[in-house]
Image (spheres, rainbow, N blue to C red):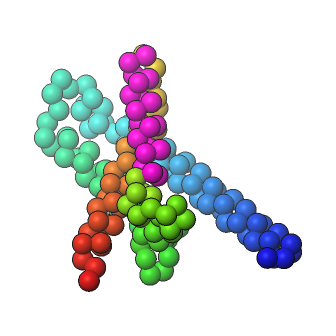
Amino acid sequence: MGRKKKADTIETWKEEHRQAIKKTQERLAKAQADTEEFWKAKDIEDFLNEKDASHKDFNRIVEQRIDKIRDVLSNKAKEYSSDNDRFHNFKRAGEMLRIEPEQALIGMFAKHMVSIMDMVRDIARGEKQPIFMWDEKIGDAINYLILLEGLVTEREHKP
């Protein structure tokens, strides 16, 4: 590859990553605002103040999580997949690393689990993380497991 072409490729890569970082920052800001709004809601305050949460309150939390999952997975689909393949990034990473796409996904998922484990460790140390961080990390972990299920299901249904 010539120097000019290599430089253009690097610049293109840098610009793509700048855009991805910007989108991620925008999503994080939105998630933080949504989470803060979520926890300000009167019914959630009541839930947190009760000794035993009712099924109705817990179900409301579940429904809100499901809505967030749908939103994130549909938005990230545009960013992290090709037009024809929802799992493009995992397959491509697997090819690059010479491993299966499921293994590539687990490698990416591990980063999120380490972060959650560190946050749990912080609880034992008396340190609190903001609720929006918990919301983001738990959501990411759930989403990766759903994506893993999709990859496994796709593999099982291939001829």
Considering the whole magenta stretch, tell me its main secondary structure.
helix
Residue plotted at (43% across, 16% down): 125
Residue 129 coordinates in the image, percent (x, y)? 46, 29
Residue 114 among those drawn in magenta: yes
Q: Nearer the viewer, residue 35 or 77?
A: 77
Residue plotted at (40% across, 52% down): 106
Is 10 on the left or on the right of 80, as rendered?
right
Extreme residue toward the left, this view: 55
Residue 144 coordinates in the image, percent (x, y)? 38, 55
When the figure is inspected, residue 139 is found, relative to residue 4, above or below; the finding is above
Q: What is the magenta range?
A: 107-125
Q: Quadrant of the C terminus?
A: bottom left
Extreme residue toward the top, this view: 126
Q: Quadrant of the N terminus?
A: bottom right
Residue 102 coordinates in the image, percent (x, y)? 37, 60
Residue 18 coordinates in the image, percent (x, y)? 69, 59
Q: Nearer the viewer, residue 44 or 120?
A: 120
Extreme residue toward the front, this view: 98
Residue 59 among those drawn in magenta: no
Quarter of the image where one finds residue 158:
bottom left
Residue plotted at (44% across, 37% down): 114
